[in-house]
Image: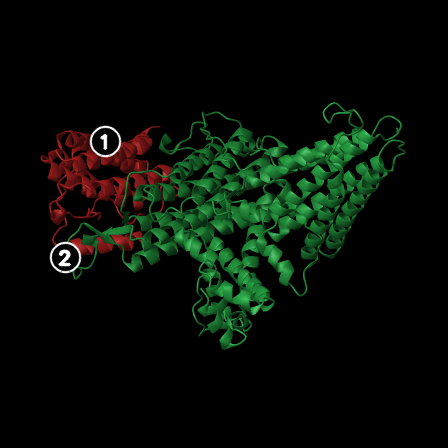
Amino acid sequence: MSDRAIFGDFVNAAAKQLDATDSGTRRVTTSADVHYAVRALLRMVTVMSRCIAVTDTSANDMTWRYARDPGAWTRARAEARQALDNAAEFLRPHIRGRPGPGISVSSAPKSAAARRIAAAALSLQAGHDLLQTHYSRKPNGLREYRSPWAPAIGSDQVSSAMLTELGKLAHRAAAQASGVALAPSPSASWAARRDLNTACQWLWVFVGAVRSAQRDEPVPAATRHLLRHIPLNTIPPRRVPVGGEPVPDLCDGVISTAERLRRAARALTPHAAWSPAMTITSLTRTAGAATVTSHNCELLLTTLAECEPAAQIRQQLLECSAAAARARESWLAAAYALDNITTDTRGYLSPAAAETTGLALWTGRLAFANPEWRPSAGPRHPARPPASLISAPEDMRRVVDAVHYTCDTLTSLARASREQIRVAARASRILVPTRTLPGSIDIPHPFAPAPDEHIASLLSRYRDAAAASSQATKEVAVVAETIHAPSQVLTAFREAIQAATGATQRRAHQANPNADAPDRDPDLPGPLQSVLHQLGVTDRDLIAHACALDRDGARLVIDAAEKLSPTRGRATRQSLEAAPVVNHVLASFDSRSAAFLRPQSPHDDRQHEAQP
Amino acid sequence: MLTHETRKRTDQTSETGRQYQDHKPAPPMCRPARSQRHECTNTEPLAEVTMSQICELHHRLGRAGNLPSVLAVAYEAFDGILLAIRSRENPAADLFAAFVMAAASAADGRDAITRAPSLPLSGLSHAVITRQAGEPEPGIRVLAGSVAELARLLAGQLAQAEQAAALAGDQNACAQAATCAREIHTLLAGATDE
């Protein structure tokens, strides 16, 4: 984890560039200085807009458009975008042409301020590119998540934190650029200097909007910490313990393996209906290794409690250890439940199963005194002595970090495995030997789809494993917060994802407040939801998101339709291309949607139908 | 839950007359050494003891001749290993990690065997793990050592069966099950090491 670039690295680099000051006396501004300052500031403004866009979603945008009383940050986001657009508009006319008579763009000396702004823009662009690695575009232009971080990046919290960070950079950039614009200059264009300064003023408007929102609803430090710790979306290299690694290296190995497992687990559900990796082999190995990993975490937490002098933290660690033991029991129960089922394919070991086994090995090397520990190492392996585990003051944070990441990953794994089994069962891929079925069921095959009660029992075991692992994660998070371990970012990460999911559901509920009514008609899937269904997407968050976007889209169409001429409305509703959207609008049962369908008079439609 | 499950299986097999009736004395190689009997570190009461059944499986596996009988006994052996291990997975005792991982391999090996086309499904029976009257509880290491020995024999028999099998399905099943048996042996072979 530590060797991966994070967004904060680039924000810090940009701030460092903009904080630098001239060592010499202030000189006269030349036309080239102004030209380059304009170009650099425009680049900075453009990158800032992109950074806002990457943390923003169309759902947030819709919230602003339809909100009667938008929140402080919703308003700030809109004002910030407007301010940046205005700043860019003032700068854009002056970037064409040459810096001065006879001076080429490449050879002209650049002022220190312009160089600093350009360098800061470059750093911020790199940060933006880092965030973009968590998303991809489908051929139809829809944005899709490529990492577990993506939903958090699009959350309201991270979006607000982004505005806060950009506000600070905007203030510095404006200060640098206005210095160029306002310095005495006999040769530079007056209009260029005026517009450069006006652009700076718009940047301060941006800063003002952010500060106002920050006063009303301060962004928690943990959320800014989360934004800064968003890593590059790359899979850490697979590491294999060689034996005898020091504790810091073992902790790094645990964290990077946990990260790899988290990614592998994320791929379980979408492919569960068809993937050959969804085998009983993978399921049993995963459950077994997760049991061992939970056991290792329990040992580690007990050892940490032994070497902690503070009574409060010691008590917290013992509670964590008890929670890890409950997680171990739950995972073991899930492993038992797997003894009675099989799958339609077998033998193939999924990446998630391999990574879980790796995590059990890494945590075991950390938990046990034997530097060569492995499950097959035989009996009588004492736990690592406290003095060996915590030999330096930083080791406590490192080990808590490693355990926190492990428990969090096991929670994700349990949830993903449960979803995987649910999807696979729906595709009749979870089987039982027919001889285990009651004699009244006569099936002339060795295997049959597992009865519903088998599946329900299995799913409940995994639900218990997820709940117990989640509880262990929460307990360890308390310790991490108490000792200021870097893994605190995980707590903010989970909160951001929960808030993003909750916001999507809230928007869906606002769009259809009768959603919980008992006798309501079933919803017609909207165009986006239909596309997701066609693609076989089963991710609940994505589907909920698509529902919300469909509903927002329907409201947008209804609003627009009220202003349309009858002729154009008719043309739209009779268009096959628009049919999915129009159908969804009408199926939304908005009282105003009738206006979209209703012609001014029946004669209008008849007259139109008569035309070719 | 496990005890209940095991009892349920015992009842089911009793009804169908599949329970082993002849409990022969364990072969010498399976009998724990006298000194090892006192090495049990697990102080919790154990629901099941499996020594005689494991040794019985060992004996039957050694006598299995043709492919269907090897597959049938191998199925029961994996099932027996699984039940034996499941009843002794105690985190407070030694070998917890080894037992948990070996159980996964046993379940996988049993599953591999069920895919063999030559497996006689009609005569298939679950292993029945019950304590014989007067039989002492084995130490956990002794049990692990016996299971490891059974797994070693199982791997060898299945490797031979793979060579002799004519059908690709049988060969695959034997090869995969042999791999699982080797994993169990590797995990538990060091159980009696000091």
Which residue appears at 62% of the width and 59% of the height? A63
Visual hue assigned to chain A: green
Is residue B188 visible in this depiction of the protein?
A: yes
The chain whose colour is red is: B
Using the rendered view, name the quadrant where residue B155 is placed: top left
Q: Quadrant of the C terminus of chain A?
A: bottom left
- Marks 2/1 same chain: yes
Which residue does the numbered mark 2 point to in the structure image?
A: B15
Where does the N terminus of chain A fall, quadrant-wise? top right
Mark 1: amino acid: Arg
Residue B7 in the image: state x and y as whole percent.
Answer: 24, 54
Is residue A506 visible from the viewing direction of this image?
no
Q: Residue furthest front?
A: A611
Residue A589 percent location from the top left of the image: 50, 71
Q: Position of residue A154 (x, y in %)?
A: 58, 49
Identify the disc placed on residue B152.
1
| Chain designation of label 1 | B
What element does badge 2 sit on? helix
Label placed on residue A547? none
Q: Nearer the viewer, residue A235 or A466?
A: A235
Task: Identify which residue, A228 or A380, lies in the foreground.
Answer: A228
Picture layout, residue A77 above or below residue B116: below
User: Above or below — where is A208 with respect to B71?
Assistant: below
